[in-house]
Image (cartoon, rainbow, N blue to C red):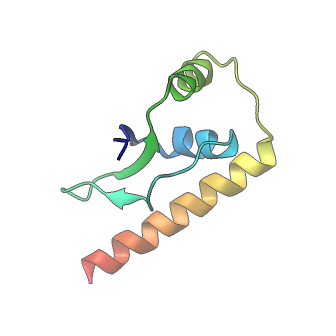
């Protein structure tokens, strides 16, 4: 069995950008052990690192509406997940 190395992304905006760019989440977003931030797991690849570099250098382009919708969706699902754990 091949081992998959993951990259934990804690920035919701970067995670949304990567999803819109075609990268797949390996599992649903989860909360950190102290419940202060969300963790988004992606497969660690050279392409992922290059896309993150392009994002932070402001050299990457995606559809703005799709990015906004994905960001809202991730935020809403993560918020509901956090609320469920607090019950």
Lateral position of residue 80 relative to residue 3, left or right:
right
Lateral position of residue 45 relative to residue 58, left or right:
left
Residue ID at (25%, 59%): 35
How many numbered dots are placed on residues in this image?
Answer: 0
Residue ID at (71%, 57%): 69
- Looking at the picture, does residue 41 appear above or below residue 79? above
**Image coordinates for residue 41, horizontal then vertical, percent:** 41, 47
Observer-nearest residue: 43 or 51? 43
Observer-nearest residue: 20 or 5? 5
Quarter in which the C terminus is drawn: bottom left
Instruction: Give the quarter of the image for residue 29.
Output: bottom left
- Looking at the picture, does residue 26 appear above or below residue 23? below
**Image coordinates for residue 58, horizontal then vertical, percent:** 65, 19
**Image coordinates for residue 22, horizontal then vertical, percent:** 67, 42
Lateral position of residue 23 relative to residue 6, left or right:
right
Residue ID at (54%, 26%): 52
**Image coordinates for residue 61, horizontal then vertical, percent:** 76, 28
């Amino acid at each position: 069995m091949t081992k998959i190395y993951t990259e934990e992304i804690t920035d919701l905006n970067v995670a949304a950008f990567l999803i819109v760019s075609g990268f797949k989440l390996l599992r649903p977003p989860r909360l950190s052990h102290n419940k202060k931030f969300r963790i988004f797991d992606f497969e660690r690849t050279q392409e992922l690192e290059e896309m993150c570099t392009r994002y932070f250098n402001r050299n990457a382009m995606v559809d703005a509406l799709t990015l906004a919708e994905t960001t809202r969706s991730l935020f809403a699902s993560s918020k509901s997940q956090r609320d469920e754990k607090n019950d």
